[in-house]
Amino acid sequence: MLKRWRIDTPLCPAGHLPHKGGDWLSSGTAQTSPNASAKSKRLISPLVGEMPGKAEGGEHRRHALSLVILSATLLLSHPALAAPLADIPVMHEEAQFAGLTHAYRGPWEYFVGGGAASFDCNGDRMPDLFIAGGRDDAALFVNESTKGSPLKFSRRDHGLGRDGMRVLGAYPLDIDNNGHMDLVLLRLGENLILKGGPNCSFEKANDAFAFDGGRAWTTAFSAMWEPDARFPTLAFGNYVDRSAPGSPWGTCHDNVLYRPEQGANAPLYEEGRALTPGYCALSMLFTDWNRSGTPDLRITNDRHYYRGGEEQLWHVEPGRSPRLYSRSEGWRHLTIWGMGIAEADIDADGYPEYALTSMGDTKLQKLDEEAEEDRPIYTDIAFDRGATAHRPYQGNDLKPSTGWHAEFADFNNDSLADLFIAKGNVEAMPDFATVDPDNLLIGQWDGSFEEAGGLSGIGLPTKGRGAVVTDFNADGLLDLLVVNREQNVSLFRNKGMKQGDRAVAGGNFVAVELAQKGANRNAVGALISIKIGTRTVNRTIQVGGGHASGHAGFIHAGLGTSERAEIRVKWPDGEWSHPYRVFANNFVRIERGEAEARYWYPVE
Amino acid sequence: MARPRLELVAFAVLAFGVQPAAAEEAIPPWAEAVIARGLQQKAPSGTLDRGTLETLRQRGETLFTGHFTGADGVGRPFATQAIVPTKRKRPPQNEFFRSAGLDANACSGCHNMPVAGGAGEFVTNVFVSEGFESADFESLDPQFSNERGTNHLFGAGLVELLSREMTRDLQATRRATLAKARASGEAVSSELMTKGVRFGTITAHPDGMLDLTKIDGVDADLVIRPFTQKGVMTSLRQFTVNALNHHHGIQAVERFGKRWTGEDDFDGDGVADEIADADIAALVAWQAGLQPPIRSTPEDDEWQKAAERGNAVFDELQCSTCHIRALPLSSLEFADPGPVDMAGTLRNGESEADAVYDLSLLEWAKDLPRDEEGNWLVPLFGDLKRHTIADQEVSAFGNELLAQRFVERNVFMTTELWGLESTAPYGHRNDMTTIDEAIRAHGGEARASRDAYIAAEEADRSALIAFLRTLVIGEVE
């Protein structure tokens, strides 16, 4: 059923040529220590493109040669885009109209980052926004949209003073279980934990939580509740250690894991444990890849700066020191310019797939046939599924793309996962597409993806970074915020499905909010299994991934033509709920132990 | 590769939005097809005038009564009868299969008593199952399916219009209650009542959460679903699309086409895009326009007298508490697609143009009584509400083993009694040969009336039967 032309070069998962010594799945010896990289004599700058280090110079002549070949390959490898059979959402950009005037700006250190957090900070269950500003101040926007209306936000003082500056990303979660969403801010310098209060108020909680925000250049975050823990375990991913000799090359900072100690009604994060080696993480995600009930930590790393590095998966077992999955355990060597992680069980086989953004092609990883419960062997199916998204799908620029935030979501409510990828040149990198529109890969019934970024209206000439996919106006259709570098954010309202020059209703949907008493009240780590006919749509509640961006609140799922759904919840401790029967096109809240789901209605 | 449907020229040119196919070929009058024997149509749009409506309904009648063939798309070797498009793993051994379908050749194969559009006797029972897994085993064994009688469709357009207005009322109450709770900052409760029928209460909280634990006889989304004995289908359009697939293997484009399945021949029978929106519209228009049943006057004087007495007994025994004699309807404009359907059934605004069938243009509408407020009074003898109809002692109506679409096994929609005399046998399984048997089988919420019936004088019981037997479909126009 594959429609794409195959290349007979050895494993080059997408359109660009294999790099000398890089971008290969390797069966060689694991190189998990910094010393190993010194022996390998890898290229300082890869053959194709570069990352923020462009500011320090690059390998232009080699690039020029490789790009000639690369361009030819790209031409051959991507025939004319087929129009998706599935619905294409009509995404209407209305950031300025909605009151969102904000850009992510700054010099080299802010070439990466550019995230946003979406969560309800005033108790109306509508997603509000905290958007990083980079060198400039971050911004808090309160959502004033009503059901199905044009989007509307009003800016609110975040109350952080200068702490609101130098923010690269933000993730929401309720750390202290008090019912108010807290915020973790990833910064250039001291990271912050903001304790959320009523009516979108925040206070710095680093001291209260005994959290030393450090001085690193933090670019990734994830969190989870370990078994029986009252408070979450936090993981921070750091980028280049700018103070190390030889910086930035080969000077990636360690990442840090914080396990909570019990304080008086609050966690104490007094002691962080270094996750060594760090390979310049740009996204990380606690993920229960083998459905063991114990999430591990997946980290995607930027090969541009590490030496001897690779993608990482850490065992994070309760009460034990984290340790890397090794080659003997099946973990394969993969080096990419990892920038974002998205997770979804796109084929509903119970095990998640992962999209990893990079420069050039996006990876789409699925457990290999050789994988076992304790052997995380992944194979890249991006090319087979049409999900490489390796170069701009419109315009005349045939250079490789630069991918950042990735997120699976069902934009057309047909029950199939779609994939959004934020794209944008790092800054002014000549070897990569200058105009690099964001992707909206629409899931097809045959398991493939088809590009609809241009047709949907999101194909703008911006430099995307972080993003949030959520339903900002509670109409059951997923909207999209994209944080752009040096340009105003893009805010796309999903108006419905494209039918000629009209927008019509999409498939049915359900939006689910989970709640449990005590710790982890929002059930981070829970699996929501939605049965529609013979099919199952799975969603997992997670904190982390994407690119410096996260969201909390209702979990959305398209139901296609199903008018009803049976929802079972695998709570974070592994206990399965009974089936909850819900009618489609509703927002429901499932409280652990309750017999029935409760319905919530937005302001109309 | 799906074979293209024969492009055939109709015998009669349809007046509404005719849009001939590019390459029409003359067809012989003996061509073995039903759907194909019509021009490729554009779906009707706007409010149809009487002539256009009649022409559309004629097309609908042709489709309703015609015996479908392979050329029409009969057969679904690789799809089940499920409402949600569902693949089979292999073709069934026999394409026609009494329980899981295909089980009919024409709509009127079952809906034929006393005329097309009517009910069917026991032999026309259908087997209701989810149809998702193991279709071969969804057999006559009641652990796999529920056996149901064939309902008549006379007055169905009015029933759907009533349900739309009731849904609108209930959801307006919900909106108002939520708004009050948000404005006051306190929980607010409201009674759900529409057209005199109570559906319990809701309580809204200031944060937008809604307590639905005390609703009664309606789904949690407050949509009145008036069709099937169980009351689980929203519209004639939805039911038509379901039934065409279940009973004939004819798959409507609006649910089984590329948009929702990625394929134009989802059932793998070699016929692509089997029935278009326009033909579904014709079927809907025909059914929606079927005249409402009437109360007849017996020629026999004694029967007349008994019926009059029975009319009073009907109230005295409180049968009319649920079998409400008539419900008021404010408009006879039947929008197609309707306002309540969900994805998979064509929805308002989803086609290029929506149509309105003004049922007041039809002859029978002149005979519908109106109240002082100008509402039409629809004499359905029902309340469009679901009730528990079985209990420990009287459990005959609790004879199903499977819940259906979230509705428990002993809960059913109040049967509309109009047309009762024309549609024996009785009960949701069509296995009660007399009205008396059916009344005696009422348990649960109807137990008191049933007990009162049994305790009543023989003359009153007989009178009640006499009255109920005056409720007939009547002479069809």
Image (cartoon, rainbow, N blue to C red):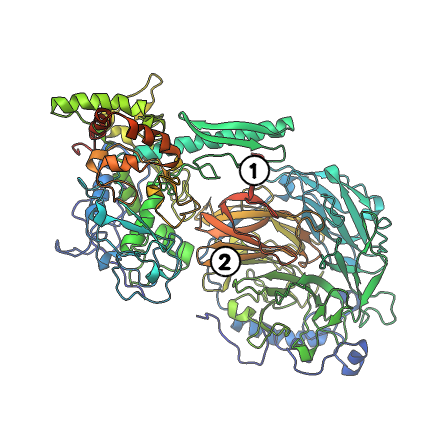
Vertical relation: B117 (above or below) B379: below
- Label 2 lies in what chain? A
Residue A162 locus on image (x, y percent):
84, 46
Q: Is residue B361 visible?
A: yes
Residue assigned mark 1: A601
Q: Quadrant of residue A49?
A: bottom right
Q: Residue at x 41, y 48 (%)?
A: B403
* The N terminus of chain A lies in quadrant: bottom left
Q: Residue at x 70, y 51 (%)?
A: A520
Q: Would you call the spot at circle 2 few (<14 residues within 10 Å), some (14-19), or many (20 or more)?
A: many
Disc 2 is placed on an element classified as strand
Q: Residue at x 36, y 25 (%)?
A: B330
Q: Is residue A469 left or right of residue A497?
A: right
Q: Would you call the spot at circle 1 few (<14 residues within 10 Å), some (14-19), or many (20 or more)?
A: some
| Foreground of the two, B170 or A75 | B170
Report the amino acid beneath label 2.
Thr
Residue assigned mark 2: A536
Vertical relation: B12 (above or below) B49: below
Furthest toward the top, the residue is: B372
* The C terminus of chain A lies in quadrant: top right
Residue A220 locus on image (x, y percent):
74, 60
Report the amino acid beneath label 1.
Tyr
Residue B437's disc number: none
Q: Is residue B151 left or right of residue A63?
A: left
Q: Is residue B86 left or right of residue A241?
A: left
Q: Earlier in the sequence, mark 1 or mark 2?
A: 2
Disc 1 is placed on an element classified as loop
State the CA–CA distance, disc 1 to disc 2.
25 Å
| Foreground of the two, B418 or A392 | B418
Q: Are marks 1 and 2 in contact (CB under 8 Å)?
A: no
Vertical relation: A399 (above or below) B334: below
